Amino acid sequence: MKARTTKKDKVNIITLGCSKNLVDSEVLSGQLAANAIDVVHENKKLDHNIVVVNTCGFIDKAKEESINTILDQLELKRRGKLDKVYVTGCLSERYRTDLEVEMPEVDAWFGTMELPLMLKQFEADYKTELIGERLLSTPQHYAYLKISEGCNRTCSFCAIPLMRGQHVSKPIEELVAEAEGLVKKGVKEVMLIAQELTYYGLDIYKKRDLPRLLNALADVKGLEWIRLHYAYPSKFPMEVLDVMRERDNICKYLDMPLQHASNNMLKAMKRNITREEMGELIAQIRERVPGICIRTTLIAGFPGETEEDVEELKEFLIEHKFDRVGIFTYSHEENTSAHLLEDDVDQETKELRAQEIMEVQQEISLEKNQEKVGRILKVMVDKKEAGRYLGRTEFDSVEVDNEVIINTKKKLSIGEFVMVKITKAFDYDLEAELV
């Protein structure tokens, strides 16, 4: 590829948004590297001459961050520090026509499914034999495994189907081969991700086939932890829980975004489930997998949300005591069915409600952490910071959940498993000593 410099091209990929975007960036890195193109991820040295910004278009804050990142890169280009700026990902998929007008200095825009087209900019070939191959940007001991793309759900607040299209599952044998390849690179934990895990298999196997996929992945030698992210509650395939209970290397952990607990809000959000049905589902999950950790995500300030709806949500949290909770403030997204509603909760109120809900969860989290004091748990060592090792139990996913501070003078290896005794509990973290 021709550039203004005489040096060999070096491409830096900047990833914004979710773990699904991160996997896309890793796949792009793998393809470029296989075409003998020098590629780095989030390069701090600034010795690259080409940038690919992989954008997020999920909610207002994410869109703003994506636009600011593109503008920053264009400023570097104007100053002669970069030759080319390319943009891909969800924001590009959704707003390309407008953005092309607003930012004509961007060299090319690509959607979420246009990897082969992007590679042509580098005079590179899309190598189909590399399916599953990618350059990991995570630490060596864990990786994300995307099992499907797109979503067939019609939640009223969500623009993801507009950016990612309809649900497409990856075949089981392809995912097993990818997992085996990851293990060879030193990966011990994979986090299964998709827009919607429980839909897996419906398109290619004509049935919800997540249980079969889990059993196949659990058979991969050297894969010590398999973790499930983003399961939809309505018509949840209960057989998944039997596999989770029976297979030692499937973490007793389920990330199930519920979004709300007031029936008014659930109906307006088009979630296809009631508060009562969610309560029954949680009880069944805990009965089938004793000790399971349930993480959920909520939305504050959806159109029409009242103080009574917020109180209902708090009561639901107190009643069901989730292990982990994340919360977003509602973002009014064009071309979603909720966009037809009046965005009648102001931003300040949205943020206050989110804060109130998290204060309720903070007490629950502390209470649940205190129950772990004295217990001996298996912990994966993630990193060393300020002279202390930080790790996670099987009940914690990376970046979003609790960490375990391991007090020891012994040298530990990043990525190894150790047995620890929990000695102290905080709101969101634990302290422990080696057993």
Image: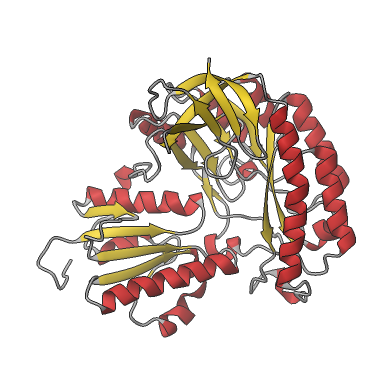
Decide: is 9 above or below 132. Answer: below
Q: Position of residue 91 (x, y in %)?
A: 49, 68
Q: For the N terminus, which image quadrant?
A: bottom left
**Type of colouring:** secondary structure
Q: Is residue 156 visible?
A: no
122 or 42, which lies in front?
42
- Is residue 97 left or right of 328 when viewed as pictured? left
Q: Is residue 389 above or below residue 131?
A: above
Residue 267: percent from left, percent from top: 83, 59
Q: Quadrant of residue 49?
A: bottom left
For the point 68% across and 33% down, which residue is it?
Answer: 293
Between 318 and 110, the residue placed more toward the observer is 318
**Camera-side residue of 177 and 141:** 141
Above or below, 329 relative to 365:
below
Residue drawn 32% across and 76% down?
A: 75
As drawn, is 141 to the left or to the right of 302? left
Residue located 73% across and 51% down the image: 358
Identified at 59% across, 35% down, the residue is 396
Outermost residue toward the bottom? 101
For the view shown, which residue lies furthest in the right direction?
A: 308
Residue found farthest to the left = 6
Location of residue 199 in the rendering, given as x and y in whole percent from the top left corner? 63, 45
Q: Is residue 146 left or right of residue 36?
A: right
Left or right: residue 126 compared with residue 152:
left
x and y percentages locating residue 112 in the rendered image: 45, 61
Viewer can see residue 81: yes
